[in-house]
Amino acid sequence: MNLTNRKRVFDPISATFTLIIIASLVVFNVLPLIKILIESFTNADGVTYSFMGYVRAFQYEQNREAIIHTLVSSSLAALLSTIIGFIFAYCSCYLKMRFKRLFDFVALLPIISPPFAMSLSTILLFGGKGLISKTLLGIQNANIYGFWGLLFAQTFSFFPMAYLALKGVLASIDPSIEEAARDMGSSRWKTFTKVTLPLALPGIGNAFLVVFIKCVADFGNPNFIGGDYLTMATQIYFQATGGYEMQRCCALAMLLLVMTLIIYLLSQSVLTKRTYVTITGKATRERTPIEEKHITIPLNIFCGVVTALVLLMYFMIPVVSFIKVWGVNYEFTFKNYQQAWKLGSEALFDTLWLAVITTPLTGLLSMLMSFLIVRKKNKLTGLMNTLGMMGMIIPGTILGYAYVLQFNEPPIVLTGSLILMVASCCSRYLPLGLSSGVTSLRQIDPSIEESAADLGANSMKVFVKVTIPLIRSAFFGGLVYVFVRTMTSMSALIFFVSPRHQLLTTTIMRMVADGRYGAACAMGTMMIIVVLIAIACLYGLIGLFGVNRKEIKLL
């Protein structure tokens, strides 16, 4: 039997798994969004339908302000993040610097920290009782809440994401192109503006759009430091939990979803037009680092200041955890940890248990879907791929709200259950593992798996014994990513918190709202420690399977 005919043979095991996965994705990714869409057109009587929800959404002044605020703050934060990220990436790839490894460490901090860590540190440093604003500068009642505080927090929270994306872009540029321009008499600046920048421009545009999506969907920073500067994510949450008109709230949620979808499609359009890799094969030699002092000194100072500021911001969390009363009494104490354990131990174990369940489930599901999409390619697997990637563009706030609406009444009642929390995390963090698995499988010759099939192995045995070992880097990378993101998740899960299931990030949020900054920082420090220990354990496990930890990427 030739290869073409083999591909046409019906495989009942693969078909069964494909249908089961598609059905699950429809239930947890599609139906909740359809529910929101229907509710956005449903009038108060529950029988008639109209566009009045969208009309009232725009008529409500706070909604109009939230839409404008989201566009303005997200655009500026994405622009600043992209600029800073590009400078860091350029320095990492082109300049001779001593502390380049710090850049990757700084990029890791937002991932392993609570999503509002930067906002919390900003309040502790520049707020009404801030170390810098009040203690050092003597400014009374300093107000960091609002647009400027949010812009600062989002910029320094998300620029590492732009840095990691642009670092890959700049590293892919063949240095011989720039060297040719230099050999023809071009200056450093002209080479940068005429060669390097144009080659990297599509990647820069994509980085901007990706960060913009993150800012638009961000809930933690606006909720902590936004104050009266409402964004669409926080406005949807407040309206959903405050007993507002459901039709208007759903209409606003649909507007946010459409906005993120448009931005995502734009980013994919830019991504497909990347042209910075213009020569195939490896470069003839490595790039010669720039050593001219008039270039290296200013950039070293800039990167050094930004790095020091970011490290200071994140270092504030463990420091404040040992302070008795921040802004009033700076005595050293362990009581914050006692209080944090008393108030948040249950949430810590619940969140850890959620991550332990979600991590292997999402990792195995992403690899199984990758196998079916690449090796059993057909119309159904194409649909499965599309449904699986939906979590990438659905803001957490919308997903959480949609789940509450969809699963709060028969035929499927899951509100308040652990199943719904696991499904939410799986839906949101599946796309990265799926895309990594698909990419890895496409680089592997299918004849290896076909040989196992020729020896009598069915599809499941081929997947377990052959495919998983071949794509173990993508598999374990997905495990690390899902665990870390589940431990620090907030926006979607905040809708599912109940006396039965507590969440670590929402517990910290309540501590801050009550003015317990020391306990909140102690709980945040404990979260970071748990995440780091878990990453170390996963890296140890990865090493046993012969995977290089450098191959594992958290973004």
Image: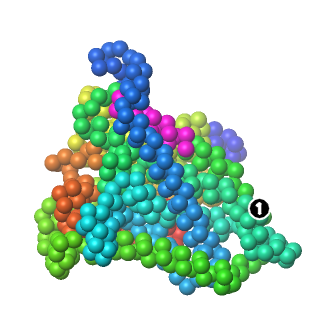
Q: Which residue is mark 1?
A: 278
The residue most toward the top is 48
Q: Quadrant of residue 57?
A: top left
Q: Quadrant of the rendered structure where residue 414 is?
A: top left
- As rendered, which of 508 and 168 lies closer to the eye? 508
Q: Is any atom of residue 173 visible in this view?
A: yes
**Residue 399 location in percent, x, y?**
37, 41
* Dominant secondary structure, magenta: helix
Above-or-below relation of 27 to 518 = above
Task: Characterize the local packing of mark 1: few (<14), some (14-19) or many (20 or more) Cα atoms within 10 angstroms.
Answer: few
Q: Check the image and tell me how it is coloured.
A: rainbow
Q: Residue at x 35, y 21 (%)?
A: 42
* Residue placed most toward the observer, 145 or 22: 145
Q: Position of residue 498 (x, y in %)?
A: 19, 46
Instruction: Name which residue lies at 46% across and 38% down.
Output: 257
Query: Is residue 487 visible in this depiction of the protein?
Result: no
Q: Secondary structure at mark 1?
A: loop
Tell me the quadrant of the picture where the N terminus can be found.
top right
Can you say whether 181 is above or below 398 in the image? below
Query: How far across and down, in percent of the image, does residue 120 sit?
Result: 31, 63
Residue 93 position in % (x across, y down): 63, 74
Residue that appears at 69% across and 46% down: 3
- Residue displayed at 23% across by 47% down: 497
Q: Which residues are magenta?
A: 248-263
Q: Is residue 112 left or right of residue 170?
A: left
Q: Is residue 181 above or below residue 346?
A: below
Q: Amino acid at mark 1?
A: Thr
Q: Is residue 97 magenta?
A: no
Question: Was residue 253 drawn as part of the magenta stretch in this picture?
Answer: yes
Q: Is residue 362 left or right of residue 404?
A: right
